[in-house]
Image (cartoon, helix red, strand yellow):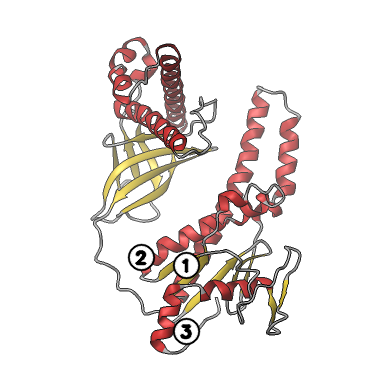
Amino acid sequence: MKRTYQFRLYPTTPQATILTQWLTTCRLLYNNSLAERKQAWETQQHSVSYYEQANQLKDAKKTTPSLQSVHSQVLQDVLRRLDKTFQHFFRRINRGEKAGYPRFKGKYRYDSFTYPQSGFALDYHHKKLRLSKIGAITITLHRRIPVEGVIKTCTITRDVDHWYACFAIALPNPDPQPQRDIRKAVGIDVGLKSLITCNNGDTIANPRWLRHSEKQLAKEQRRKDRKRKGSHNRHKQNRKVARVHRKIRNQRKDFHHQLSRILVDTYDLIVYENLRITNMVKNHHLAKSISDAGWGQLMCFTEYKAEEAGSLVEYVSAYNSTQRCSRCGKLVPKTLATRIHRCPYCGLVLARDHNSAITVLHRSTHYLKSCSSSGQELSVEPV
């Protein structure tokens, strides 16, 4: 089992300068390697492999002093990252998807480097992360890495003016978590007005973090637009805009963590619609609101928490879930503007999202099996 642990770093000014220089060196290596691959194909129809480029690093260090200051495995990981990018490029071509040829990384567009095997060590006693060729950096260890976990990689990430260390941990596969008896089940309809609506009628309002920060964001962006392109002041203003985006991102992430924890602790079975969110955000009228809601992140958090807690998360078809009556099963067409479900066949009147949540739950195979075995519907608890 693999898990990622992220901790905040507090480098000194000289250390932050070295980290930034390493990012620049890695970015230039990435761009030069990409240019080499591109030129080799255009002139000789030859695909340059990772191993060919990795074998050139030793000679490249003799002519490029900046490469000598960076840990050798970090440089190798840069080439490995480029190779993975090309693998994904060819995979998309084979699947007939939009390919998207690998792009060169511009300034401030390369924000992480990785120690793939060695060159780092955690000092729990002094709360330091020791990085080869950089030194000991103060780290906030807000939780302890499990003793049985093996640290596989250490990735140093820059987020505007914050630095983080991300550790990929390999944990032994635990004994299968005893599956909880399905006594409480919930069908969930995700939306924009209410983030989630449950089959018992409970709703959780959509916080709309981006919408609430739009005025501040627009203010900072207008200030940026008044600065001359390429100037130091414009770069400083770019960082202020990025800080606003970071705050919005962190608010959304924290809210989803709390909500997913409540769902997992309350219910034994959680049923979501299997939505194609990537296709939904192509609607330019709803793209910003859908991205602000972050349905995919909420589902992902719920899924991994449920796995550890022994509860179930199931995805069911979303086809006509809002158009079909949850009582009689008849199709009742309605537009997006119609927020109340009124069935002309059985007389059911419900909020549109409430009706959809009930339909979602009734499509769950685990729910139907539990109902058939117990002979009665499962209880539903308020969120």
* Measured Cα–Cα span from mark 3 to mark 1: 21 Å
Does 86 appear above or below 242? Answer: above
Front one among 329 and 137? 329
Q: Residue furthest bottom?
A: 375
Say if 121 sits above or below 367 in the image.
above
Q: Residue at x 66, y 22 (%)?
A: 231
Give the position of the N terminus as an image quadrant. bottom left
- Looking at numbered disc 3 in the image, what kind of residue is underneath it? Leu
* 128 with respect to 380 (left or right): left
User: Alpha-carbon distance for marks 1 and 2?
Assistant: 11 Å
Q: Nearer the viewer, residue 179 or 171?
A: 179
Looking at the rendered structure, the kind of residue marked 1 is Arg
- Give the labeled residue for mark 1: 261
Q: Position of residue 218 (x, y in %)?
A: 74, 42
Residue 214 position within the rendered picture, expressed as x and y whole percent measured from the top left: 72, 48
The residue singled out by tag 2 in the image is 308
Report if residue 37 is visible in the image.
yes
Horizontal side of residue 83 vs 204, given as left or right: left
- Left or right: where does residue 116 sit relative to residue 26? left
Q: Nearer the viewer, mark 2 or mark 3?
A: 3
